[in-house]
Every structure is written in C-alpha cells, then in structure tokens.
Amino acid sequence: MKKKHLSYLFLLIATALLGVFIFSHERVDYLPLKDKLKKVKEVTVVHSDTISALIFYHAADYFVYHGSVIGFQYDLIKKMGEELGRPVAIAIESDPAKAFLKSFSNEYDLVGFDFDKEMFTPEYITQSEPHSYTYPVLIMRKEKHPDTTKAHVVHASAKYANRIDFSELDNPGSWKLEHHPDATVEDLFDQLADGEIDYVVCNYNVAITMLPFYKHLVLGPRIGDNFPRTWVLNSNNGALNDTINQWLSGFKKTKEYDRLCTRYLSRASQLIQNSFGKQKNSISYYDKIIQNICDKYGLDWKFMSSIVYQESHFNSDVLGMGGSFGIMQMMPVTCARYGITDTSTVEEQLVAGAKYINFLYRIFDGKVDVSDIYSFVAGSYNSGPGHILDAMSLCEKYGGNQRRWEEVAQYLILKSHKEYYSDSVVKCGYYPGKHTVNYVDEVMTRYHGYVITKQEE
C-alpha cells in the first residue's frame, strides 16, 4: 500500500515538473512584443565613468570625410563627453533591426537611432531631450513628373516608421507607402538613380547629405510634420540621464550648436555641397596604392589607411618627435630596417609601413582574439610590441584574459606605476600607456568607420 502511495506521489511530482517545463518553454515563443521588450529591458549593465553610446550608421550622423570620421550625432556626442569631462566610447550599428533591439537593452548609456518612439511608453524607453528636429521628404529623379492619373509607390527603407502625410500632394489617394525590410536608404537611392523605382521617402537631414552623391536626384516636397530626434537613454542611469538632458538643453542655446546644425543639417553647408559628392568612395588620394600594397601583404587596407591618417593625415612631408618622418611616421631605426630614408617616395614609404604592420600582425597572430588583433597591432605601432607583450604578461599573471585588448589595455596603463613596471614579468620597464590606449581607440574607431562607409570597387 505504501508503495502504491509513493508511486502516485512520484507521478504527481513528475507531472507537475513536466507542466512547469512545457509552460515555461512555450511562454518564450509566444510572448507579446511588450513582454519581450520588458525582458530585454531587465538586462542591467554597469558602466564605468565612460559614456557608452551606439549610433546607427547613415550618411547624416556618421561618415568619413577626407579620412576622418565625422557626423552630426558623432560630433555632438563627442562634444558632450568633452564638456562633461567624461571619455566617450562610440559603437556603430549598420543593421536597423539590431539597432532597434539594442535601443531597449540598456546595454549602452545612450542609443542614437531614429524610430517612432511615440509607439512606446516610458515603461519601455527613456528618451532624452530632443537633440534636433527633422521631417519626411520625397526624393525623385530630376526628369520625373508625377502622373496624377496613376498610382504612385513611395519606397521606404527598413524600420522607417515616421508618419507620412500625402495630403498636400496632387491626388493624395494615389500615393502608397511600401517598406523594404532588408534595404538601407542608400540601397533605395541607388535603385531610384538606376530607374528601378520612382520615389523614395527619407528624413530631411539624411536627404541633404545623400543628394550630393546623386546628381540626377532632387529633393521633393515635404510629406509629414516636424518630429523630434531623441536619444534612447539607459533607464538605470537616472543621474547620468539628468546630466545628459541638462547638457543638451544648455548646449542647444549656444552658437556652437548652431554651427553644428549649419555644418550638417543645412542645405547651405559647404561641407555637404563642396565635398561629399567627390568623396563617396575615397579615403585618400593613395587608396589604390594602399589597396594594392595591402593585398600583397595580407592586410586590410582600411586598417592601414586609419594608421596613416593617425600618423600623418596622409601628408608625406611630416617630421615628428624623435625623428619620425614621412607618411608612415616610422622611427629612424625602423625605417633603416626597411631601407627607407627621407628621400624615399611615398609609395616606398607605404610599402615599408605595410611590411612593418605585417611584422607586428605576425607577432600576435594566434596569440590574441582574432577580432582584437588589429587593436594589438595598432598599439604596437604606437608603442613598440615589447610594451604590449609586457601588458599581456601582466594581464595573464593577474588573472585577466591576455587575448582581449580591452583587458590588456588596462595593464598597459598600469605600466606607468612602479608596482607593475618593476614586476618580474615585465621586460621593457616603465611606459605611460594611456596615450597608446587612446591612440588605439582613435585608430579602431576610424577603421570601423572606414569598414562601414567605404564600398569596395
């Protein structure tokens, strides 16, 4: 009898556990959107004094001009960090679906991604003060004149969710909006220029930046009201959010903010009118030479271009501290190793630079995470590989992951303290590593900008 009761009890417990298992797994698949967003929002990330920001890449907010990464939101966030006395780490996302989800994750202190935020209550997102305003506009080919007797399709890029109003156009009922979930605004501009589609909608701030690339496209009428552009803030950062909003409110009253808007958000911008159309797929005058050299030595030409910009801004007659010279700014002892003198041609200097970068690459190949190897190479180009190897040894000794740059960089900075530069694993002694860490941040930020913005020919 007892055995029978025990069997019933076991069966009841097993049934209950099975029910919990099935219920919990089914809930994951059928959660409504608001509950999914709530689960994403519960993720909490603790940040240091660095302000971490994510910008969605498009031509108005983040792009490359004469080798330098600039853009409205990029410059605005950098300026904020400078005035608040806090370093800023900016990540770039080119996939709108990922940028949308990250807006709800609290992974960053702020996310600069435009979507219809009115759809989401403060329960799901925390918005900043508006940093600017824009409105939807129609883009068409110069020779295109709408036939008011026919239906018209206006094409919108992925995640374009701002309200469209066709009421001011002729025969408003003939206009229809079509979304392309896998297309960027650049893709649609290309299709429009090639005659594959007739109309595109985008925001005014994007349009004025894109149009100089497309001489046969024109800005059409406004098809919607002004709406604010805001950042999505981390809901766990109450004090920081107040600081960001106070800064935005004050900065928007300054002449510097007006200059920023004129530079990026005005059709009168000399930067836009005179330069963008000529620089769409060019980092520098030496692109082709650098590409050919890097192909030979197995390097990413965009990474090498970022190093060159950091060292000389592509100027070949620069004389640096310690006797470094030329477009690669290599030190005399390194130049001698590769047969370079101050009379060498620019191409010869670039070849020598590629050989040296390839040498540094081979030092770390297989020893560090493949996604971080260019950070180690950039650091070595600035400090010499010995100090980077010292920092890796310190990182390993104190329990860190010596394969990841983020962790090794902390010990490179610590090499300016006696406790660390006198450690038995250190071979190259004292080094003020903060400068090199900043150097790597700048090189890699620019490199990632080149990767996103520069098309292969």
Image: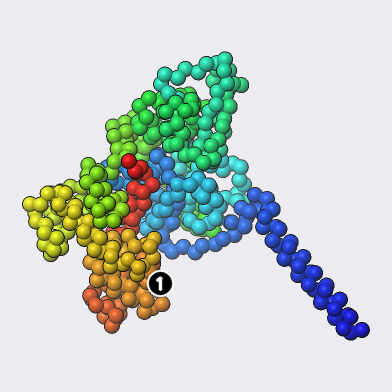
Considering depth in this image, is 103 or 314 the residue closer to the camera? Answer: 314
Residue drawn at (9%, 54%), measured in percent from left and top? 342
Is 34 on the left or on the right of 224, as rendered?
A: right
Residue drawn at (42%, 50%), measured in percent from left and top? 92
Rendered position, 79 above or below 207 = below
Is 331 on the left or on the right of 380, as rendered?
A: left
In the image, farthest residue toward the bottom = 2
Residue 317 horizontal/vertical position (percent)? 13, 49
Considering depth in this image, is 227 or 351 the residue closer to the camera? Answer: 351
Residue 19 horizontal/vertical position (percent)? 77, 65
Q: Kindly tell me whether residue 259 is visible in this rendering.
A: no
Is 360 on the left or on the right of 214, as rendered?
A: left
Considering depth in this image, is 347 or 95 the residue closer to the camera? Answer: 347
Give, as a three-letter code, the residue at label 1: Asn
Q: Kindly tell me whether residue 235 is visible in this rendering.
A: yes
Q: Residues within 10 Å of mark 1 (few under 14, many from 20)?
A: some
Residue drawn at (78%, 72%), measured in percent from left and top? 14
Rendered position, 387 above or below 72 = below
For the N terminus, give its image quadrant: bottom right
Q: Quadrant of residue 8?
A: bottom right
Residue drawn at (41%, 21%), measured in percent from left and top? 142
In the image, farthest residue toward the front = 296
Callout 1: helix, strand or loop?
Answer: loop
- Residue indicated by mark 1: 401
